[in-house]
Amino acid sequence: MSATRLRLRVHPGARTSAVVGRHGEAWRVRVTAPPDRGRATEAVLTLLADTLGLARGDVTLVSGAGSR
């Protein structure tokens, strides 16, 4: 399987979870989970897996788990 890297701009604590468009070279992603104890990170990975039709285990975080 080949790998693809996506640059994301994540907005935690949103009303709905969705990939909403582009922000420069990054994809804008909103998740309802709060930015607390990795909840937003897990929500982003699950959303991407569902959106791309992949198993959750096939989506990984390379960098950026901390705050901006």
Image (cartoon, grey):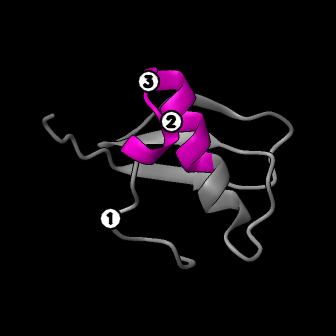
Residue situated in front as seen by the camera: 16 or 38: 38
Q: Residue at x 57, y 78 (%)?
A: 67
Q: Residue at x 53, y 47 (%)?
A: 45
Q: Position of residue 42 (x, y in %)?
A: 63, 56
Give the residue number, with chain letter if any, for mark 1. Answer: 62
Q: Position of residue 36 (x, y in %)?
A: 77, 74
Element type at mark 2: helix
Badge 2 or badge 1: first in the primary sequence: 2
**Viewed as shown, does residue 67 lie left or right of 1?**
right
Contact flag, marks 2 and 3 (Cβ < 8 Å) = yes
Q: Identify which amino acid the numbered label 1 is placed on.
A: Val
Element type at mark 3: helix
Badge 3 or badge 1: first in the primary sequence: 3
Give the residue number, with chain letter if any, for mark 3. Answer: 52
42 lies above or below 47: below
> Can residue 24 be found in the magenta stretch?
no
Q: Identify which amino acid the numbered label 2 is placed on.
A: Leu
Contact flag, marks 3 and 1 (Cβ < 8 Å) = no
Q: Position of residue 58 (x, y in %)?
A: 37, 42
Q: Position of residue 16 (x, y in %)?
A: 80, 33
Give the residue number, with chain letter if any, for mark 2. Answer: 48
User: Which quadrant holds residue 15?
Assistant: top right
User: Which quadrant holds residue 34?
Assistant: bottom right
How many C-alpha atoms fall within 10 Å of the one at disc 1: few (<14), some, or many (≥20)? Answer: few
Q: Identify which amino acid the numbered label 3 is placed on.
A: Leu
Question: Majority secondary structure of the magenta segment?
Answer: helix
> Can residue 56 be found in the magenta stretch?
yes
Highlighted magenta segment, given as a residue range: 44-58
For the residues labelled 3 and 1, the Cα–Cα distance comes to 17 Å
Q: Residue at x 79, y 54 (%)?
A: 33
How many C-alpha atoms fall within 10 Å of the one at disc 3: few (<14), some, or many (≥20)? Answer: few
34 lies above or below 2: below
